[in-house]
Amino acid sequence: MSLNQIIFLILRRMRAPLLMVIISYAIALIGFVLIPGVDDRGHPYHLSFFDGFYILSYTATTIGFGEVPYPFTIHQRMWMTFSIYMTVISWFYAIGAIIALFQESALKQALKTAIFQRDVRNLMEPFYLICGYGETGGELVRALDRNELRVVVLEIAPERINELEMTDYQFNIPHLCADAKLSEVLLFAGIKNPMCRGVAALTDDDHANLAISVAVKLIKPDLPVLARVQDDVVAANMASFGTNRIINPYHIFGEHLAMRLNALGTYLLHEWLTRAPGDAIATPAAIPQGHWIACGYGRFGKSVVSSLQNENMQVTIIEADPKGTQCDDCIIGSGVEAHVLQQAGVEHAVGIVAGTDNDINNLSIVMTALELNPDLFVIIRKNKRHNDPLFQHFNADITMQPSDVIAHTCLAYMVSPMLAEFLTIARHKGNQWANAVIAQLVSKLGEQVPDTWDIAIADEMAIAVCAMMEQGLQPALKHLMMSPAGQQRREMPVVPLMLVRGNQEMLLPELSTPLQIGDRILCCGLDQAKSIQRFIMHDVKTMHYLVTGTEMPETWIGRWLKQ
């Protein structure tokens, strides 16, 4: 519903109260004009329409200036008394109707929807639509806001919308309390807006995320969709509709754990590039080889056990519901009992996995296990963010929270689609290669998490670079990594991670590589360098200086003399 439609609706609902006010004023006004008064010389007179309206205005609004221009006669005072009650009652009726109208939840929702649509239409920057502002959605919105990316939020729970409104973000975030499964709501949220760069379906309902994915792919097939899912059947259904990225946090954690087991450098590179800029990443401890105990054989437990067993480790499983989890070889129990842990061989184990869906049980499991074997390596699952203080106090070796895993996966894709592509290739390059990349990045950028972004050599995206090519000059990759500093060209803290030219992917390309139209480059560096690089790509004079080392004449005479 548009704002014009809402105004029309309000006027239609206010028709009766407004008519009552107008009619009461008209009756009172006619009476004042028709009833004769007496002036100061005893002559009869009649009030004009303006005088009558003036008296009614200060009387009906209870201001009250008195009897003008002369004291009223008894008949005029009787009519005044009647007019006061009539007009005041009509005003009370109209004001009451207005208050009742604006208390209606349907009208309030229509107003919020109209304002939301207007805010989305007015977005002049690329944005992502986030469906679901729970723990995962909130974490992702905060990270995107810190990366200076605009977002639009749909959330069905009013209390989460209130939480969003109370959070201090650097950008205004258009948001609406509505069911994102409805295609109409998705249209309100701008999935057909040319500035919309993608949709993240992050509700805690797999079927809702499926409905969002299907709706987006049917309405706008080219729009990328990232969807959270836990059920493999639903995930297969999403894949059949062409969902671009299906995120199962337990599978991803299992992959990361396997990466950490056999390729610690690759794991660290992945963590370093997918965290929010400015974060500090500690060097992860190596996971010990040997006998492990896994408590809980649900989706998380199965993923972790599979990763450990793939590394030829012995894993003893403790599960309270073997039939429900289809665990054929396990010790029955929850893991909080000391005798069950002893039965699983905790005294000789090197590590324990507390992976149930209950945070308190997980903490109890590891505390009991550590009393029996203080040297255990601990992997613990954290289900709820509000338990953060408990888990921070405990300080496990690895703490897994599904919302963090999903948010970081989405962030890697949204901040730069090329980053996700780079990380996929990096997994196959080996641990030694990853360590070399980390060393290069740390030496140039420092130890905090850098910013990552991609650029494209195209007409509108790199006006200055294209202008140099038209002039017969040959800008190279290194010219995009420099900034002018007085009479010198200074190298900026930026590292090109990947250059894509057609179907060819060049990892860590040489800085001397000549640029071509259509090149896409993934860069990694500090935020200030990112801003300078964007400026350089659009400023012909600066780019000319960086490429040639000489300043470009600004006038026609100067250019003629230079020739």
Image (spheres, helix red, strand yellow):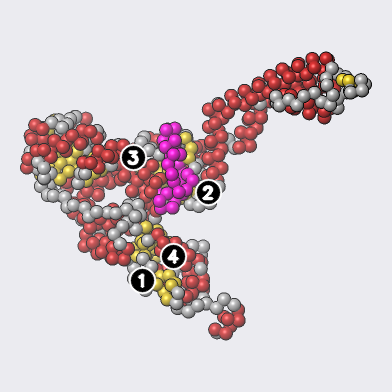
**Amino acid tagged 3:** Val
What's the CA distance linking mark 3 and mark 1? Answer: 41 Å
Q: Would residue 100 be found to the left or right of residue 274 on screen? A: right
Q: Is residue 6 visible?
A: yes
Q: Secondary structure at mark 4?
A: helix
Residue position for label 4: 533
Q: Is residue 25 magenta?
A: no
The answer to the question of whether label 3 and label 2 lie on touching residues, with beta carbons closer than 8 A, is no
Q: CA distance from mark 4 to mark 1?
A: 15 Å
Label 1's element? loop
Q: Nearer the viewer, residue 520 or 390?
A: 390
Check disc 2 and report the residue beneath it.
Answer: 123
Q: Residues within 10 Å of mark 2 (few under 14, many from 20)?
A: some
* Between discs 3 and 1, the one toward the N terminus: 3
Point out the frontmost of discs 3 and 2: 2
Pointer 3: what residue? 229
Q: Residue at point 42% right, 49% down?
A: 145
